[in-house]
Amino acid sequence: MLVLGGAGFVGSHLCDRLIRDGHRVTCVDNFATGSLANIQHLMQTNRFALVQSDIVKPMTFSEKFDQIYNLACPASPPAYQADPIQTIKTSVIGAINVLDLAREHEAVVFQASTSEIYGDPLHHPQHESDWGNVNPIGPRACYDEGKRCAETLFFDYNRVHGVKIRVARIFNTYGPRMAVHDGRVVSNFIVAALQNKPLTVYGAGAQTRSFCYVDDLVEGIVRLTNAPDEVTGPINLGNPEEFTVRDFAELVLGLTGSRSQIIHLPLPTDDPRQRRPDISRAAEQLGWRPTIAVEDGVRRTIAYFDGLLGKVEPAHQPDSATARRTATLRGMSSAI
Ligand SMILES: NC(=O)c1ccc[n+]([C@@H]2O[C@H](COP(=O)([O-])OP(=O)(O)OC[C@H]3O[C@@H](n4cnc5c(N)ncnc54)[C@H](O)[C@@H]3O)[C@@H](O)[C@H]2O)c1
């Protein structure tokens, strides 16, 4: 198995899963946003190999791969907007290199596409038949249009060269190993709440998002990649439970027992108003649906960040419910 972007948040969980399933895994990463800490624990196994490389450059390997998973691309808006030209090169030139490799190896190739290809969606919830509503020249376009072009390339390589493709449109995913400064809403809120710093909500916080726990996503990725060849996707993978950003901030405050305030800033350019996947295709073709409730997944993620950031300074005498909750979280952090 070849995992491109395997030192990132989702990629490292995928490497864990493939190693657990008994495979030999090669991870390629340029460490633009990934970290060695995410895969350090795998370095002891002789079934795991790490190659530091950029997928924008053509790749050659002496061993033969059965499956190639392309997750290499910065995913958080601050990260992908920091170097937009590199982002679009990664998505487009990277996709060509990945597809040429898949063709050479006759491997099944998985592409981590995104709900961002729907842009500011015209239909709700988002179904795979929606063509999207994307601003092609805005600051998010390097990611949205890059991923759209990558999908085009995947389907053209499938039609022209018969490459066995699997394309997933991934919706907001969260969990342990997100970077502290990742910049996405789940980690932003949890890190701020644990430090009793203000939680920043853009606009009134009425925009909606749906949040999928990383283990559920990895299960969907593995099922899709191992599905029959006619199941090419695109296929939505995400949790259809929808929250306003404001309600999600309240949930995080409740689960952390934080004394943080919520502050409001103007909406960023092209911020999508609604996000919820229609997962009927994933249910029908893969028998997949998320199994981890958002509250449960957020608790596990809080425990992870709590372990990273150290003990939360007690802000006030917690009521008994908060004290019980905090005790549970502390108990969980060593198990994750
Ligand atoms: N996490 C989500 O909510 C989400 C949602 C939609 C789509 N996705 C997609 O899933 C994939 C993984 O996302 P993530 O959340 O784990 O992000 P991440 O930033 O944690 O991981 C991306 C990994 O790719 C590596 N990378 C970036 N550019 C590279 C390049 N040119 N060559 C080699 N390696 C490179 C990074 O160093 C990092 O390890 C991305 O393709 C992303 O677009 C993620």
Image: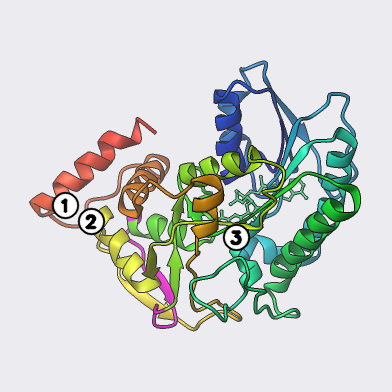
* Colouring scheme applied when the structure was drawn: rainbow
Mark 1 surroundings within 10 Å by alpha-carbon count, few (fewer than 14), some (14 through 19), many (20 or more):
some
Real-space Cα distance between discs 3 and 1?
Answer: 31 Å
Which residue is label 1 attached to?
Answer: 322
State yes or no: discs 3 and 2 in contact (Cβ < 8 Å).
no
Give percent across and percent down for residue 271: 56, 77
Check if residue 322 falls in the magenta segment: no
User: Is 139 above or below relative to 170?
Assistant: below
Give percent across and percent down for residue 321: 12, 51
Real-space Cα distance between discs 3 and 2?
Answer: 27 Å
Q: Amino acid at mark 2?
A: Gly
Viewer-side label of 3, 2: 3
Q: Is residue 134 left or right of residue 239?
A: right
Q: Amino acid at mark 3?
A: Ser
Secondary structure state at the residue bearing disc 2: loop
Outermost residue, left side = 320
Q: Quadrant of residue 27?
A: top right
Mark found first going from the N terminus, 3 or 1: 3
Which residue is label 2 attached to?
Answer: 257
Give percent across and percent down for residue 168: 63, 53
Query: Which numbered disc covers residue 67?
Result: none
Give the prevailing secondary structure in the magenta stretch.
loop
Secondary structure state at the residue bearing disc 3: loop
Mark found first going from the N terminus, 2 or 1: 2
Camera-nearest residue between 4 and 312:
4
Ligand 1 near label 3 (Cβ, under 8 Å)?
yes
Quarter occupied by the C terminus: top left
Query: Which numbered disc covers residue 76?
Result: 3
Q: Residue at x 62, y 75 (%)?
A: 119
Give percent across and percent down for residue 46: 67, 15
